[in-house]
């Protein structure tokens, strides 16, 4: 692990939802870099590790901190929630890593919120799906709008990441209005809050109902495709089997 940084997706929350590979890498690490919030989610066995962090929105600094620690000879792991390569820091690490050619990088896959949230709801992703992040911090809103429109027209199941934040509490409503241009009001939808964490809450509803729901930043939203339905409170997407 010398002069090699592991970029680890820790899954949605509880330690049991982490892969064995991720657990193994974190056990080997001397320094773990990431939000201290994740430290609270992780079990007892990681509490004794050296833990380094930077404030929210200082992602590039957090990455550089990893390279600085690795160059001191420390075994470094950078942790991200879910999968580090899905709206996480994996690609930024490779970009910044161009300036540190002697440091090797390895990404350890994690269970992303689309997958863990789908399991809570039922089986909504059982056909072609796409994910769209509603955060316009790094992506202009008109591009997000275009992608939503295209996804709706192509009949994808759509998973929305970052559906809300303190500053953007009407983004889900705005997204639903775009989707409602080409999807019927009764379309089966669902959302899950705090997947794999205390206070997990799942709801199913129609697209029109979803428009007026308030969700927080720890929520992942699912919009079904034309083959989706709610069965006994579970959101499922038919795969097309004849039964
Ligand atoms: N890398 C992460 C995604 C980070 S973007 C992953 O692969 O899951 C942050 C967004 O992910 C949140 O706004 C939310 O939409 C979703 N998310 C991440 N963890 C979640 C959890 N435990 N419960 C619900 N949604 C979650």
Image (cartoon, rainbow, N blue to C red):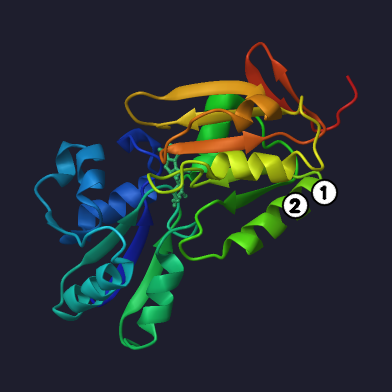
Specify the label residue 153 is tagged with: 1
> Quadrant of residue 176 in the image?
top right
Q: Quadrant of the N terminus?
A: bottom left
Residue 207 appears left or right of 204: right
Residue position marked by numbered label 2 in the rendering: 149
Above or below: residue 6 compared with residue 51: below
Residue 136 visible to an observer of this rendering: yes
As helix, strand or loop, the secondary structure at mark 1 comes to helix
Instruction: Determine contact: label 2, label 1, CB under 8 Å.
Output: yes
> Quadrant of residue 156 in the image?
top right
At a point 43% along the width and 59% down the height, the residue shown is: 88
Residue 153 at x, y = what percent?
82, 48
Please state which of residues 139 and 64 is positioned toward the viewer in this rendering: 139
Specify the label residue 238 is tagged with: none
Q: Residues within 10 Å of mark 1 (few under 14, many from 20)?
A: few
As helix, strand or loop, the secondary structure at mark 2 comes to helix
At a point 36% along the width and 47% down the height, the residue shown is: 10
Q: Quadrant of the C terminus?
A: top right
The mark total stands at 2
Residue 43 appears left or right of 231: left
Of all residues, the one furthest to the top in this rendering is 232
Above or below: residue 233 compared with residue 195: above
How far apart marks 2 and 1 lie (CA) works out to 6 Å
At a point 52% along the width and 26% down the height, the residue shown is: 120
């Amino acid at each position: 692990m010398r002069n090699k940084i592991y970029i680890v997706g820790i899954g949605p929350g509880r330690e049991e939802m982490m892969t064995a590979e991720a657990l193994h890498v974190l056990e080997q690490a001397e320094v773990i870099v990431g939000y201290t919030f994740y430290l609270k989610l992780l079990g007892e066995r990681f509490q004794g590790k050296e833990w380094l962090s930077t404030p929210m929105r200082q992602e590039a600094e957090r990455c550089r901190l990893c390279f600085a620690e690795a160059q001191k000879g420390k075994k470094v792991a950078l942790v991200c929630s879910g999968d580090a390569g899905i709206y996480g820091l994996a690609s930024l690490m490779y970009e910044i890593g161009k300036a540190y050619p002697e440091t090797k990088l390895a990404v350890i896959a994690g269970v992303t919120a689309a997958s863990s949230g789908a399991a809570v709801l039922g089986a909504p992703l059982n056909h072609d799906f796409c994910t769209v992040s509603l955060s316009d911090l790094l992506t202009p809103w008109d591009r997000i709008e275009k992608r939503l429109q295209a996804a709706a027209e192509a009949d994808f199941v759509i998973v929305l990441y970052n559906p809300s934040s303190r500053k953007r509490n009407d983004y889900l409503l705005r997204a639903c209005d775009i989707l409602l241009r080409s999807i019927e009001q009764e379309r089966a939808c669902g959302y899950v809050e705090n997947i794999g964490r205390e206070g997990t809450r799942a709801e199913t509803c129609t697209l029109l109902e979803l428009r007026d729901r308030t969700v927080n930043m720890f929520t992942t939203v699912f919009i079904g495709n034309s083959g989706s339905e709610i069965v006994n409170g579970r959101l499922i997407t038919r795969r097309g089997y004849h039964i």
